[in-house]
């Protein structure tokens, strides 16, 4: 079991010293709690609390600092929450709106254009809203919220057990972990945590320290090692050189077996020694879904051309016009 000491420690060459999550707040001012159909006045001024933030929708966006105010609200799964921030006529305020999940700490919406957020809630719980002054603008405003199921009381995140594996990936390795792994993971960092008789899998966006691919967390060295569980160091295990080549040289996330339906996958035929081996993988930015054949002479994956339909048959011979 991971401890807070392990999570806060710099574990590997991949670790980032002082990695900062998307939103860090000055907690001197308590957050205002919002309920359905509330309309609350706010005032961003020179002595307002400072918040560090970034736009997580833009890869590698820099951290910035702005004065602002924090709000919290509870919402039910399926709610379509609408938040509107209206600066007063005499105000010079140009708002930035940042919405995040208290449970996961992940940013879910960002808007610095229209002063409006509309969010369909995927998971019941508490959410945090930051109203920030863009470019040091100041002034009074009104924040209005609607679409929340009335009377909802969500669990307090402070009473919930945090996901220590996710925290470790974020704090020690600087990864932005996704809520769930999508069906296609070819462009992501996929990390496996083998524990007892179960393996936990997490997906994250690559960064400058960890490139796209499969990794396994090694608890003995507290590092991320390339490859799936059980394929890293056992010299007596038989590895599949064809699969390794597809993963290492072509960046493909090869599946353990090919499913019955392969229309959305990269399907590779690998002729070798009078036998053809078949592999299936998630598409990536280089190889789109389709059928390919490995050419050992050119060491490349060549798309398989679909046979052209016959327009005329003469004596059993297909003629394409």
Image (cartoon, rainbow, N blue to C red):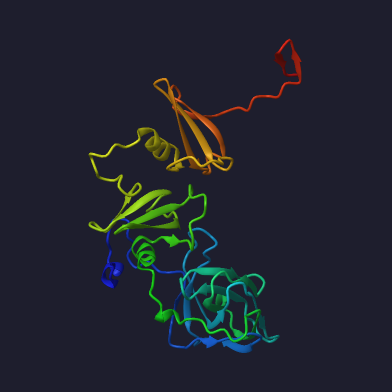
Residue 95 versus residue 169 in the image, above or below? below
Q: Position of residue 41 (x, y in %)?
A: 62, 89
Outermost residue on the top side: it is 315
Task: Reply above or below: 257 against 197.
Answer: above
Q: Which of 69 and 48 is in front in this view?
A: 69
Return the residue nearer the eye: 64 or 127. Answer: 127
Above/below status of 308 relative to 134: above
- Which residue is drawn at the image coordinates 32% and 65% (left, top)? 17
Q: Residue at x 50, y 86 (%)?
A: 31
Q: Quadrant of the C terminus?
A: top right
- Check the picture and name the quadrant holding the N terminus: bottom left
Instruction: Please give the name of the residue rendered at 35% of the width and 35% of the height, measured from the top-left corner.
Output: 240
Q: Where is residue 312 in the image (x, y as percent from the top left)?
A: 76, 17
89 horizontally vs 286: left or right: right
Q: Looking at the picture, how far across and down is residue 69, in whole percent? A: 53, 83
| Residue 289 pos. (x, y %) | 57, 40
């Amino acid at each position: 079991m991971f401890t807070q000491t392990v999570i806060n420690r710099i574990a590997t060459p991949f670790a980032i010293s002082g990695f900062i999550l998307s939103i860090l707040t000055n907690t001197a001012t308590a957050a205002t709690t919002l309920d359905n159909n509330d309309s609350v006045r706010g005032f961003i001024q020179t002595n307002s609390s400072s918040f560090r933030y970034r736009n997580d929708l833009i890869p590698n966006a820099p951290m910035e600092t702005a004065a602002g105010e924090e709000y919290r609200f509870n919402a039910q799964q399926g709610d379509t929450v609408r938040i509107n921030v209206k600066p007063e006529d005499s105000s010079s305020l140009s708002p930035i709106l940042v919405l995040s999940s208290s449970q996961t700490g992940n940013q879910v919406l960002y808007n610095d254009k229209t002063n409006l957020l509309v969010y369909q809630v995927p998971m019941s719980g508490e959410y945090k809203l930051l109203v920030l002054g863009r470019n040091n603008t100041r002034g009074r405003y009104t924040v209005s919220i609607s679409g929340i199921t009335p009377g909802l009381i969500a669990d307090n995140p402070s009473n919930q057990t945090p996901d220590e594996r996710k925290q470790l990936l974020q704090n020690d390795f600087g990864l932005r972990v996704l809520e769930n792994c999508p069906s296609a993971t070819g462009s992501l960092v996929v990390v496996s945590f083998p524990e007892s008789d179960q393996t936990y899998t997490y997906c994250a966006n690559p960064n400058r320290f960890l490139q796209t691919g499969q990794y396994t967390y090694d608890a003995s060295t507290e590092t991320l090692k390339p490859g799936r569980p059980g394929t890293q160091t056992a010299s007596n295990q038989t590895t599949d050189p064809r699969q390794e080549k597809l993963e290492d040289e072509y960046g493909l996330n090869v599946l353990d077996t090919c499913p019955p339906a392969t229309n959305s996958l990269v399907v590779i035929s690998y002729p070798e020694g009078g036998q053809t081996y078949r592999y299936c993988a998630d598409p990536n930015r280089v190889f789109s879904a389709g059928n390919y054949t490995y050419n050992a002479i050119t060491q490349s994956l060549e798309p398989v051309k679909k046979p052209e339909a016959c327009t005329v048959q003469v004596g059993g011979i297909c003629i394409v016009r």
